[in-house]
Image: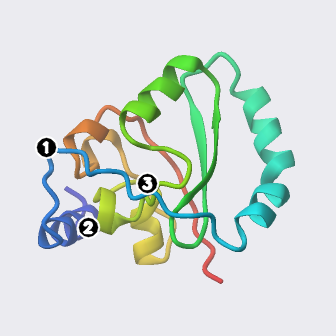
Amino acid sequence: MRPEIALSWKRSELRGLDPGRLPEPTLLGPSDTSGRLRSAARPVLDELGTQLSGTECCILLVDRECRIVTRVFASASMQRAMDDLGVLRGTELSEETFGTNALGTPLKVGQGLVVHGEEHFLEPLKGLRTARHSVKQT
């Protein structure tokens, strides 16, 4: 296991997360900036949605608290899969709540990081393919 992933797993264990169980979604109210963030990202999200059409991909836009601001799906089956995992609009995907993942872990460490399927801390997330994420701290 890569050192950065091993450290994330250790943090997840110390938080008391159960790797075999999905947490109850932590649904947060919209942040003051979520509407502006969604508006600013809309042209890019629309273009990505078009390019990904017919694939099993999704795009999740999160704010600085790692709260899902919006979701873009290329297929209904992917939307159902994300819904089943509790990855809903307003859900906090921080490392503290969802363990090692491609959105919360880069935010925690303050740098871009790729998390491959088997590197997710939570077993139900291990079926997800590689996700890339870059972080810009403000």
Q: Which residue is mark 2?
A: 8
Residue count near mark 3 (Cα–Cα under 10 Å), binned few <14, some 14–19, many ≥20: many
Q: What amino acid is labelled 3 in the image? A: Ala
Q: Residue at x 38, y 51 (%)?
A: 115
Upstream in sequence: badge 2 or badge 1: 2
- As helix, strand or loop, the secondary structure at mark 1 comes to loop
Residue 27 lies, in percent from the top left, at: 45, 57
Upstream in sequence: badge 2 or badge 3: 2
- State whether residue 54 is above or below residue 11: above
Q: Which residue is mark 3?
A: 102
Residue 130 lies, in percent from the top left, at: 43, 41
Q: Residue at x 39, y 58 (%)?
A: 26
- As helix, strand or loop, the secondary structure at mark 3 comes to loop
Residue count near mark 2 (Cα–Cα under 10 Å), binned few <14, some 14–19, many ≥20: many
Numbered disc in front, either 2 or 1: 1
User: Left or right: where does residue 58 sit relative to residue 108?
Assistant: right
